[in-house]
Image (tube, rainbow, N blue to C red):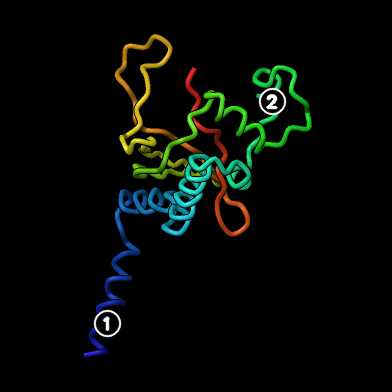
Amino acid sequence: MRTSHVLVTIFVAVLGCGAPPEERVRAATDASRPGLQDSAQAREAVEQYLAALARRDYEAAARLHVAQWRQLAPAMLEGEPDTLSFAAFLRRHCERGFYVCGLRLERVTTVARRAPDTLVVSFWSRDSTSARYRWGPCCGGDDGPDSVNVLRTVPRDSSYAVVGLPLYLP
């Protein structure tokens, strides 16, 4: 019985080598999708980042973030000191309502690879009343409200970190 199992495995493997071109293309495309571990780590980074912002733990949110933010400072801080930390930047802008920081991750809708080292996590979130958060239409647009938010993540150490800032509504 064991020998027949081995023979079937070898037969299936040999047949796979002669797969038609469209099957090889599909396999190559599948290889570009994030792996389960990468996807789970990216999701976890987004969930932790949002949770830290929602509980007003700006130090923890800052530790989960890796992108540049200082280029926004001159326009948004109106003369604030250059020594301001990212955690203080988040505190100031979340508490003043420039960013929507009280959201909790409800459900990840997709995780997609956008660059060799970037995973984009699209998700729905809930506000403090546990309702799905919706915004818009933005800037005079005709579209209805939107509920899917997006944050980019990149690998850092043995996990992922968030690149984007909290949701900004003009």
Q: Secondary structure at mark 1?
A: helix
Badge 1 crowding class, 10 Å Cα cut-off, few under 14, some 14 to 19, many 20 or more, is few
Rendered residue at 46%/44% (across/down): 113
Q: Which quadrant would the N terminus be assigned to in this image?
A: bottom left
Residue nearest the viewer, comparing 170 with 81: 81
Q: Which residue is mark 2?
A: 71
Rendered residue at 50%/25% (across/down): 168
Q: Are marks 1 and 2 in contact (CB under 8 Å)?
A: no
| Residue 67 picture location, percent across and down | 63, 38
Residue nearest the viewer, comparing 135 with 91: 91
Residue nearest the viewer, comparing 94 with 36: 94
Residue 133, quarter of picture: top left
Q: Position of 8 compared to 26: left or right?
A: left
Labelled disc at residue 7: 1
Q: Is residue 27 above or below residue 51?
A: below
Residue 72, quarter of picture: top right
Identify the amino acid type marked 1.
Answer: Leu
| Residue 107 picture location, percent across and down | 34, 44
Q: Position of 105 compared to 97: left or right?
A: left
Rendered residue at 50%/43% (across/down): 55
Labelled disc at residue 35: none
Q: Is residue 74 above or below residue 51?
A: above
Q: CA distance from mark 1 to mark 2?
A: 62 Å
Identify the amino acid type marked 2.
Answer: Gln
